[in-house]
Image (cartoon, rainbow, N blue to C red):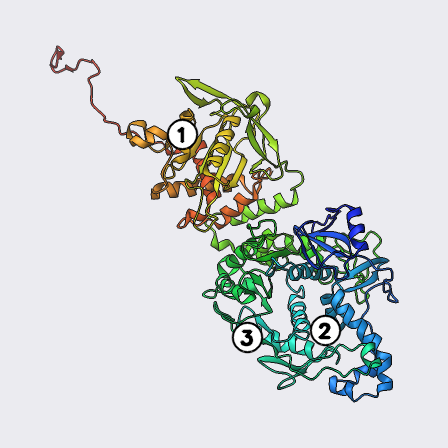
Amino acid sequence: MYEQSLVKIIEPIKRTTISRLNKSKKWKYGYDKEHDIVVISKTGKIGQVVEIQNLRIGLPAEPKSVHVHAKNKWQKIEYPKELSRLKNIFDWRSYPEDQKEKWYDYIDEEFKRRDEGFWFINKGKPTYITGTHYMYLQWSKIDVGAPDFREANRLFFIFWEACKADKRCYGMCYLKNRRSGFSFMSSAETVNLATISSDSRYGILSKSGADAKKMFTDKVVPISINYPFFFKPIQDGMDRPKSELAYRVPASKFTRKKIQTNEQLEEIIGLDTTIDWKNTGDNSNDGEKLNLLVHDESGKWERPDNILNNWRVTKTCLRLGSRIVGKCMMGSTSNALDKGGDNFKKLYNDSDVSRRNANGQTKSGLYSLFIPMEWNYEGFIDEYGLPVFDNPCDGERLGPDGELIDVGVIDNWQNEADGLKNDQDALNEFYRQFPRTEEHAFRDETKNSIFNLVKIYEQIDYNEEMSRTLGVTTGNFQWVNGIKDSQVIYYPDPKGRFKLSWVPPQQLQNRVVLKNGVKYPGNEHMGAFGCDSYDISGTVDGEGSKGALHGLTRFSMEDAPANSFFLEYLSRPPTAEIFFEDVLMALVFYGMPILAENNKPRLLYYLRRRGYRGFSMNRPDKVWNKLSTAEKEIGGIPNSSEDMKQAHAAAIETYIEQYVGLLDQGYGNMYFQRTLNDWARFNINNRTKHDASISSGLALMACNKHRYRPISERVVQSSPLGFKKYNNKGHMSKIIK
């Protein structure tokens, strides 16, 4: 059975607290700092609190009356024919007064749904959609006519509403699958917001100017044209403009009060609101104040255009000082990493809501959202808009058009993937188009890796599939009773800095040998560590490279897996000293030596100062008397030598070929996804960004140090063996002197 992890109902607030504040309608639309939730309700009441990709969202409370469609599912409510004949506000004003009266309640209700959202029964369950989603379903015309209701889109719009409500947020960065409907949904939102705003600017960007123009002419304009008269302002210029949609005369919100009091409708004034598109470039929309910027196909900006540079520029168009006045709606599948995908990936990772600065903002200012393909794959969504994950047991699931769905999307997707196993680039493209994980979405082309990318991705896919049974734990080390240089224990912690796939049995832990006052590892025969350290706690950009540590076993007679990476550490604690202590505790716990780069020597001096010089391995390519004074003092290996760079890369390459991916006896036991992905992207000419590769490669060199020993020069000298030589001429032999 498939278990979804996209959305979950949580209870971060006591029910009594919710009831108490609901009674007095105290819940305000926006970010609630006290309870750390984003409230998207506009009624003063909240019901369920859901979590979507780490963002906690308070939904409106279920009303007493919920709309029921005839077929127990979403159906577009038919637009009254009498009103459909009215094309604009001027037609309405000339409409007989006695005929207007019966439509005021209908119009008021549509405005209310647009603002507060809409509840309806779907498959017997009360279901909430946001006002934006309602406008998309009820009043937006797309290429197939009226959009279908999809649960995936419902969650998308709930997340987007939270982005709009949260004053800390600049918008969303949506990682999507192909044909998910993002272009239409973002176009619908553009028209929805523009038609209720004055003195506002709305912009569209895509992977090229031609694509942005097509989105404007084929999606935005038709949606605007097909709005009912009470939502649609009068346009300036042509009915179907090519470059700019300008709203002049606003639609009016009519009420029964106005007609009863004979109040005059407001004076006709221009909205002065425009929607336009721009050519793709780093400085598109520079200097303009924007209420909404739609970024379509952001992961497909090919060089020299750079989505990162563009976002740095346009981000300033969405704020006045520290106040955010506009939002960005960004969505895309990803190109291969060298075709713009790497920039989008960085932007997406910088939008993680679980990592915020002191102002409560993500590094990019955006909130990342990934909806796996199984939620939104055409042909596998039933008549209720719900995804068909597993094979229907009864074969009774019907699609929106009444077609029978007899297989689940998971099996169908896997069958397609299996058919592409022999063509890795085609498989990676399929993964990028229809990703089930973030890893799939950012798959690279095999030609871009110096290592065997086929085997790396085989291992990654296996790890993802078997994630629940691999036994990888997250945690930290600590000294027993806080006494340094005693014994070390490991304790699981979901927020820990270490990932472990093997913990040695009790009798193998904390093996430290003392020789002449210097501590040496007692399990050197079992394995070793590799480390890519750093010296400075702070960095210019506030991020910097991570400290990396990897543990690797070698073949031994002990109770340990052979040739297996058992520890991964990729973190940058607040101070370098915390990192050094983390490394030291891992060394003591496993009783294994470490090979570290000595061009960043603070770690090695730290070990020496604490009495652990015996744990620091010397460079394996030189004998003792050839080491420099510093190398004799602290150990380690430099990273500047081209020979060492090549040897380091060759060590990783050999390991991948022998122990990663599908092997004769099954799959390899390399279970650390971050390291595998770092190998996939490793650039030998620019190693600074590949902390995991540096560290893991050093661990491999440490465990195979015999391969790098220098060949001693031998001087061959002839020496007599002590045998006499004789001259045998004549009748008597004579000794040759």
Foreground pick, 664 / 75: 75
Residue 705 picture quarter: top left
The disc, 2 or 1, on the residue closer to the chain's N-terminal end is 2
Which numbered circle lies on residue 324? none
Q: Mark 1 points at which residue?
A: 617
Disc 2 to disc 3: CB gap under 8 Å: no
Q: Is mark 1 on a helix, strand or loop?
A: loop
Residue 419 position by quadrant = bottom right
Report helix, strand or loop for mark 3. Answer: helix
Residue 587 relative to residue 92: left or right: left
Given this view, does label 2 or label 3 mark the residue nearer the observer? Answer: 2
Residue 268: x %, y % from top left: 69, 84
Mark 1 is on which residue type? Answer: Met
Distance between the alpha carbons at the discs numbered 3 and 1: 59 Å
Task: Please state the horizontal and vertical placement of residue 40, each as a whole percent of the image.
Answer: 72, 59
Please give the label number shown on residue 210.
3
User: Front-most of 389 and 120?
Assistant: 120
How far separated are the C-alphas under marks 2 and 1?
A: 67 Å
Q: Which amino acid does the dot numbered 2 rest on?
A: Ser
Residue 11 higher or lower than 525, as above or below: below
Residue at image location 57% in from the left, 56% down from the top: 348
Residue that badge 2 annotates: 140
Q: Distance between the residues labelled 2 and 3?
A: 23 Å
Q: Which amino acid does label 3 sit on?
A: Ala
Foreground residue among 470 and 188: 188
As helix, strand or loop, the secondary structure at mark 2 comes to loop
Residue furthest toward the top? 732
